[in-house]
Amino acid sequence: MKRQKVTLKVNLGGIIQGNPSLLSWWKRARRPDGKVKIISQSVSILDAQLFEQLMAITKSGDQIEICVVN
């Protein structure tokens, strides 16, 4: 199966320390009928160096750019 990579500008919901640590994000999306829907997701942060960098330079509510590969 071919992997898909999507780059999104999203709002940072929070970073949760743990094993693995989690990054939660949300984004407003407009539906075809014109209504706005909030999409949210949490993803694991497996790279310890990336986790430390995120903790140092971001806070909840910041707009960030993420790449999701599935």
Image (cartoon, rainbow, N blue to C red):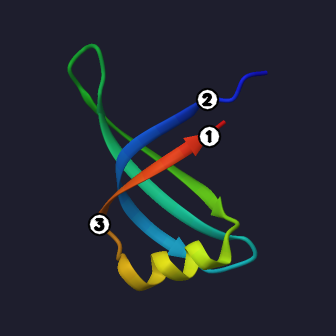
Circle 3 sits on which residue?
62
Quarter of the image with the N terminus is top right
Provide residue 46's location: percent of width, then percent of height: 70, 66
Determine whether the residue tagged by mark 2 lies in a helix, strand or loop: loop
Residue 21 in the image: above or below residue 32: below
Amino acid on which the number 3 mark rests in the picture: Asp
Q: Position of residue 62 (x, y in %)?
A: 29, 66
Q: Which residue is mark 2?
A: 4
Camera-side mark, 3 or 1: 1
Mark 2, Cα crowd under 10 Å, few <14 / some 14-19 / many 20+, is: few
Q: Mark 2 and 1 residues: CB-CB less than 8 Å, in contact? A: yes
- Residue 56 spot, x, y in % from top left: 42, 85
Tell which circle, 2 or 1, labels the residue nearer the N-terminal end: 2
Q: Residue drawn at (61%, 29%), measured in percent from left and top? A: 4
**Relative to residue 17, is residue 19 drawn left or right?**
right
Q: Give the residue type that dot 2 points to.
A: Gln
The secondary element bearing badge 1 is classed as strand
Between label 2 and label 3, give the one nearer the viewer: 2
Residue ID at (50%, 60%): 24
